Image: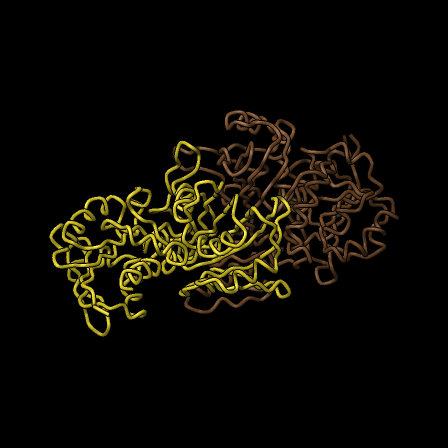
Chain colours: A yellow, B brown
Amino acid sequence: MRAWRVAIAGATGAVGTEMVKTLERRNFPVASLKLLASARSVGKKIRFKGEEIAVEELTHEAFKGVELVLSSTSGALSKEFTPSAVKAGAIVVDNTSAYRMEPDVPLVVPEVNPEDVKWHKGIIANPNCSTIIAAVPLWPLHKAFGIRRLIACTYQAVSGAGAWGIYELAEQTRAVLNGEPAVPKKFPHPIAFNVFSHNSKVAPNGFNEEENKMMNETRKIFHEEGIRISATCVRVPVFRAHSEALHVEFGEVVSVEAARAVLARAPGVKLVDEPGRNYFPMPIEATERDEVLVGRVRIDPALDNGLALFISGDQLLKGAALNAVQIAELLTG
Amino acid sequence: MRAWRVAIAGATGAVGTEMVKTLERRNFPVASLKLLASARSVGKKIRFKGEEIAVEELTHEAFKGVELVLSSTSGALSKEFTPSAVKAGAIVVDNTSAYRMEPDVPLVVPEVNPEDVKWHKGIIANPNCSTIIAAVPLWPLHKAFGIRRLIACTYQAVSGAGAWGIYELAEQTRAVLNGEPAVPKKFPHPIAFNVFSHNSKVAPNGFNEEENKMMNETRKIFHEEGIRISATCVRVPVFRAHSEALHVEFGEVVSVEAARAVLARAPGVKLVDEPGRNYFPMPIEATERDEVLVGRVRIDPALDNGLALFISGDQLLKGAALNAVQIAELLTG
């Protein structure tokens, strides 16, 4: 297997840091690794396979000689720099929302639609974290029983907002326990001992961007425009794994036993479903794990052929860095 | 208006404490107030209208001369003591689940079915907290558009588990911030920086008791056996207000404007729905408020005539003590 000249754009962020670790942990064939970030991180050193690599500035010229870019910047920065990377001959696996819904950009969850990487034109988009985490267990159920409707309610960790989200939760919580007010800095509202509707812009349809991503990206990944989806996305005071309550209607009769059997053999899924001792997926147990934990499998009486589930998945790993590296692995195959 | 000889059973608990305050705040016509609790709280003093009242032991004889009991003990204690209170001639407003689904016991949310208090036979049941908080905004929408299906996902505060739930969240959170483990004491799992499926027993249908309460009690309160309901109930690290994502299908076409207009004039509801600045109901703002905050009103494309909402309500007030006192007020009317 040949080795790749890799760059990580946004290497010092919460996701970028996990991308470096994930490349090492999965032994991705790296010939060389360039770590790119904004000017203020230049010179910072990050360890990769026992070596200290100095962070370089993300510029249009930085992609020279690079074959693969794992990008986790902002949507705006991705729009600015991704074309330069493609022009330099690199394939970009982009973790931002910049290109996800472009018709000529594949949007890939390797457990779901690995074949879509084949038609890329330089950019492959990594889906939204909540979308990926739901797609992994829903896809095998869709193949078995045919999903018609999905209502998803999320319990999202602060890591989705980057390293500052993690810092802000810790700082505010400390303040409240000391009898001081929780002062929001980057989040619009206090997150300590609170929940709030996801802090992305609300679109004219009343759904916020996070919800619209889940609704639109899931249909694109599944190649099923007919699935009816709605979502409520909510931030909760949890550090780094997202949880979701999924209420699903299928085209065919589904039983708890049949659904559990499908999930038990599904790639990327771990069944955590012990009603007897009230033991189900929890974000603290999904943290730093590759698998999406799935449980609370039960018949949903509000829907025809309905099934309800509860899932937890690491937002920084399967929701971002791991999925991106898995996409890159498909390219090496 | 005549004054009542009142007793509070479970007066030292999280809900009992709020019952005392709520009777005073709403100026309920109290002739005398007896505060009943377990033996270990006897002698403890609680302030009511400037007077210190000593807690007495909850015994079968304690109800002599009492006309109205507000009871917030456990289901088991209610089964034991409520019959004695009724035998002594008192009307019992019971906050436990002991009698809620008994056909000869009215289950009342004053904004929904006040007329049901008329057929009580000594016991009036106060519904489950998550049920009440959803019922207040859903009832006027039901009257206007006819609810057919409801999928509810909850974000429940620890106060629902009583005073110890509040203590456990604070203690565990402090431990985690100090780099120590979150050791669960009464909850089955860590609650600090975590969420978990509601810690009530899981029934054979796969739903836990909290979820089954929401599903069954809502139909009883609304007198609508045909509404299809499912729920996912989840504990979140929030102190005392519950939030819920509600996805609702109606029998008639509903618009965002029409739904908002109905909610804006509904009793017990406060519309908090400002998409432009991402400002919606939050548990920290519902805390110590009487109204259920309602927002995120939007068309739900996954359901026919669908509407999605997000609500927050104080679990100890409208979810328990306030609703019980409002039921008592119906008796004085």
How far across and how far down the image is residue B140, in percent?
62, 30
In which quadrant of the rendered view does residue B265 lie? top right
Image x and y of residue B25, in percent: 64, 38
Q: Position of residue A281 (x, y in %)?
A: 52, 61
Say left or right for A176 vs B77.
Answer: left
Image point (58%, 51%), residue name: A307
Residue at image location 27% in from the left, 59% down from the top: A16
> Nearest the camera: A43 or B183?
A43
- For residue B250, above or below residue A332: above
- Quick one: A171 or B132, which is closer to the camera? B132
Examine the rendering and report whether any part of residue A237 can be seen.
no
Relative to A201, does residue B17 appear above or below in the rendering?
A: below
Q: In the picture provided, is B175 more to the left or to the right than B209? A: left
- Give whichever of A138, A210 is nearer the camera: A138
Q: How many marks?
A: 0
Point out the image quarter for the N terminus of chain B.
Answer: top right
